[in-house]
Amino acid sequence: MTSRAALALSSAVLLMLSGCKVIHHITHDDACNKPQAYQRASSIAPLNIPQGLDGPDTSRALDVPPLNEPAPRALTPKDPCMYAPPSFDVPQQNGRIGEE
């Protein structure tokens, strides 16, 4: 294979591979801040056990606490996605742990 043919073949392969990414972004909306299906979920009534049957063991069930905080600001599709947790700047106190 000549160097021209190899260059043409590798260029064609790279063009095809990069085209997949471009086509994917054109055909799919990858905005991570768009409303998700789980956000439309709602609660359902508690399980109704027919008379004569035993209910499930709920001794180890977890209660979901109520959310008593204000809702966070709604993100738009233009806002950056959070692929990594934010950095935390914790102020250092003078002295050692446990000293006051």
Image (tube, rainbow, N blue to C red):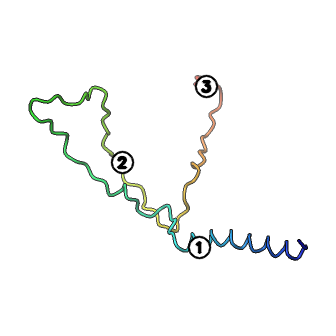
Disc 1, SS? helix
N-terminal-most mark, 1 or 2 = 1
Residue 54, percent from left and from top: 17, 28
Task: Using the numbered discs, state the Cα–Cα distance from disc 1 to disc 2 in whole angstroms.
Answer: 41 Å
Give the residue type at disc 3. Answer: Ile
Residue located beneath label 2 in the image: 69
> Quarter holding the C terminus?
top right
Residue located beneath label 3 in the image: 97
> Quarter holding the N terminus?
bottom right
Disc 3, SS? loop
Q: In this view, does 2 lie to the left or right of 86?
A: right
Is 27 in front, or is 45?
Answer: 27
Give the residue type at disc 1. Answer: Ile
Residue 33, percent from left and from top: 47, 62
> What residue do we see at 31% from left, 27% from top?
60
Q: What label does residue 90 carry, if any?
A: none
Q: Is residue 94 depicted above or below 18 in this figure?
A: above
Q: Is residue 46 left or right of residue 93?
A: left
Farthest residue in the left direction?
51
Quadrant of res 68: top left
**Would you call the spot at circle 3 few (<14 residues within 10 Å), some (14-19), or many (20 or more)?**
few
Q: What label does residue 23 carry, if any?
A: 1
N-terminal-most mark, 1 or 3 = 1
N-terminal-most mark, 2 or 3 = 2
Task: Using the numbered discs, state the Cα–Cα distance from disc 1 to disc 3 in whole angstroms.
Answer: 55 Å
For the residues carrying marks 2 and 3, which lies nearer the camera in this image?
2
Is 99 in front, or is 1?
Answer: 1
